[in-house]
Image: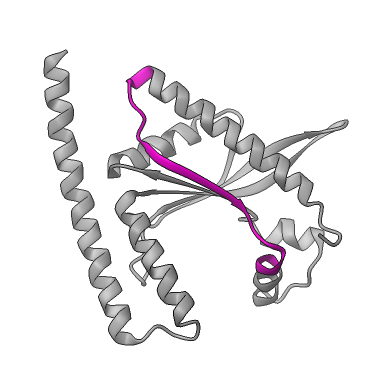
């Protein structure tokens, strides 16, 4: 892949996947359940990186990839309930092996499109011969409902690369509001379920 050492990003992705697996396993051991529905990981393609750099007005170099493309590595964690999002955020924040560089809560403050998710930019250590290097990665944490909406939004933007028609954009916004309400209702139901489980024990 040209002069970009993508093997480093492969190392960092494996490190991050392993750390998350350990954190989630420990959470399950302590609490008796796992809040995670599924986890997906990827490394951006060369084409995607080049397009993003061009959009930022930067040339394609190793230094610019590390400086401007903070989501070469991407991890998406999909959970059942709204409260689970913040449990996972807390879990990652307390990790001694991952450094938090930046975070954006698009759940409390959704994007203008209606997009909701919790984003974290983290620094992942990779242990090379004689030294340690940190690479950036993006972790997205969202509910199943948010993930469904994001998938629909992505498909619409793929079909309408220039601009989504106003009618469809409004429908997406309406669905985003419906999903936020659904997540709130499911959260309340889960609180009742948890209450009954605590009473049984």
Position of 93 with respect to 201 (left or right) is right
Residue 132 x, y percent position in the rendering: 78, 34
Q: Does residue 137 lie above or below 201 as drawn?
A: below
Q: How many marks?
A: 0
37 in magenta: yes
Towards the viewer: 102 or 184:
184
Quadrant location of the N terminus in the rendered image: bottom right
Q: Residue at x 34, y 62 (%)?
A: 149
> What is the span of residues highlighted in magenta in the rendered image?
30-49
90 in magenta: no
Q: Does residue 113 lie above or below 125 as drawn?
A: below
Position of 192 with respect to 41 (left or right) is left
Residue 71 x, y percent position in the rendering: 61, 56
Q: Residue at x 27, y 79 (%)?
A: 170
Residue 41 x, y percent position in the rendering: 56, 47
Q: Does residue 178 lie above or below 76 as drawn?
A: below
Residue 56 x, y percent position in the rendering: 66, 73
Position of 19 with respect to 175 (left or right) is right
Quadrant location of the C terminus in the rendered image: top left
The image quarter in which residue 65 lies: bottom right
Position of 144 with respect to 137 (left or right) is left
Q: Residue at x 51, y 47 (%)?
A: 40
Towards the viewer: 22 or 136:
22
């Amino acid at each position: 892949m040209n002069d970009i050492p993508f093997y480093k990003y492969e190392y960092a992705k494996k490190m991050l996947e392993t750390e998350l697996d350990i954190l989630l396993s420990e959470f399950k051991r302590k609490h008796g359940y796992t809040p995670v529905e599924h986890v997906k990981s990827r490394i951006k393609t060369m084409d995607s990186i080049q397009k993003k750099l061009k959009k930022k007005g930067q040339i394609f170099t190793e230094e610019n990839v590390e400086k401007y493309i903070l989501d070469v590595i991407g991890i998406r964690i999909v959970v059942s309930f709204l409260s689970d999002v913040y449990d996972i955020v807390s879990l990652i924040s307390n990790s001694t092996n991952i450094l938090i560089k930046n975070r954006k809560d698009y759940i409390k403050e959704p994007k203008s499109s209606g997009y909701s998710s919790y984003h974290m930019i983290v620094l992942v250590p990779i242990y090379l011969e004689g030294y340690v290097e940190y690479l950036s990665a993006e972790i997205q944490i969202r509910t199943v409902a948010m993930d469904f909406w994001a998938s629909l939004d992505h498909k619409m933007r793929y079909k309408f690369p220039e601009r989504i028609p106003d009618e469809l954009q409004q429908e997406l916004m309406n669905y985003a509001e419906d999903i936020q309400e659904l997540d709130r209702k499911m959260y309340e139901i889960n609180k009742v379920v948890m209450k009954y489980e605590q009473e049984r024990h």
